Image (cartoon, grey):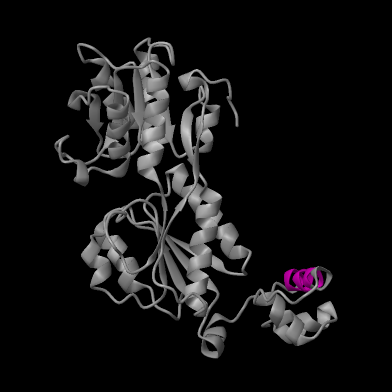
Amino acid sequence: MTVTLKDVAQRAGVSIKTVSNVVHGHPHVTEEMRERVRAALDDLKYQPNLPARYLRTGRVGVLALAIPDLSNPYFADIGRAIIAAAAAQSYTVLIDCTGGERANEMLVLDGLRPHLIDGIILIAQALEPEDLQAREVKVPLVLVGDHLLDVAVPYDHVVNDNVAAARLSTKHLAALGRRRIAAIGDQHALAISDRAAHPRRLRGYIEALEEADLAVDAALIKAVASYSRRAGAEAMRQLLALVVPPDAVFCFNDLLALGAMRALHEAGCRIPDDVAVIGFDDIEEASFATPSLTTIAPDKEQMGELAVSFLLGRIAGTRTSPPERVEVPFRLIERESTGGLDATS
């Protein structure tokens, strides 16, 4: 038997209007009343009638989150932050994995219909600017992440300041007295002189080297096919094979750094005595590695909250300003891999 709002209202001893206010996340309900209604919803196993809700309000209370890689803990962290922020507004989040493939990301833009979802949060990795300029996405869209950062897009965009974060990481290594600082994570075969086209983390790395009067050595910049532990380990082995190996390495994410640390361990190198290592993302594994990993920690909770807030504002029509690009704050967490003492924070 289908459970209705009337059934829930009778169980909770409140009006149908009060139940509706709780279900739809309206603020004008006392906490005591809200708890009574939630208990009744749970007891009766109430499930909203999404088609009916859509016909009545034009909304279904569901957001889509498209991420590139389910196995990457960073995307899992962002997903948790978005789900929590959406739940606080009584929204459910459906997750789609694109594999970072352009065709799959375009399907997210073209294939999700308004009667299924109210809006999309997309962490893109392969879309071209024209994919967003030329398409009329049928529901509100918010972008999250670093891709498409250097072009104007017609959607709100929540990002990290990757140039500043990479610059801070590299300056930290230089301040420790390291002079051959490598970088692992470039995915573009670009000339060092082609500064404007560099990915932002590479750009920040190069700027920091120049500020420290250190040479920018192309042999110390290793490209990878993926941001994985395996790729990080292989890149580190190549760096160790140089006639003069690096004494520090900045990795463009924590998984690359963890792989690099494994390769250093296998080669008998001491971290940080022989080679200091910095990652990026502050995944949980970073604080429990041996040694613990120094890393850049973006404010992932704020990233999720902003993405959901922007999207719900577009859905409700209360956010009518031009699309905005917002950078979330970050901090450098010093741990044992660069000589710090903080192993678990």
Using the image as rendered, state which of residue 308 and residue 10 is in the foreground.
308
Is 35 located above or below residue 253 in the figure? below
Is 52 located above or below residue 170 in the figure? below
Q: In which quarter of the image is the C terminus?
A: top right
Could you tell me which residue is drawn at 40 percent across and 23 percent down? 173
**Residue 233 lies in what quarter of the image?**
top left
Is 18 located above or below residue 336 in the figure? below
Residue 237, percent across and down? 27, 20
Highlighted magenta segment, given as a residue range: 34-43
Q: Main secondary structure of the magenta part?
A: helix
Q: Can residue 234 be seen in this view?
A: no
**Residue 182 lies in what quarter of the image?**
top left
Assess whether residue 20 is covered by the magenta stretch.
no
Residue 219, percent across and down? 19, 24
Q: Left or right of 177: which side holds 206?
A: left
Residue 193, percent across and down? 15, 36
Q: In which quarter of the image is the N terminus?
A: bottom right
Could you tell me which residue is drawn at 61 percent across and 64 percent down? 87
Residue 194, percent across and down? 16, 41
Could you tell me which residue is drawn at 31 percent across and 28 percent down? 211
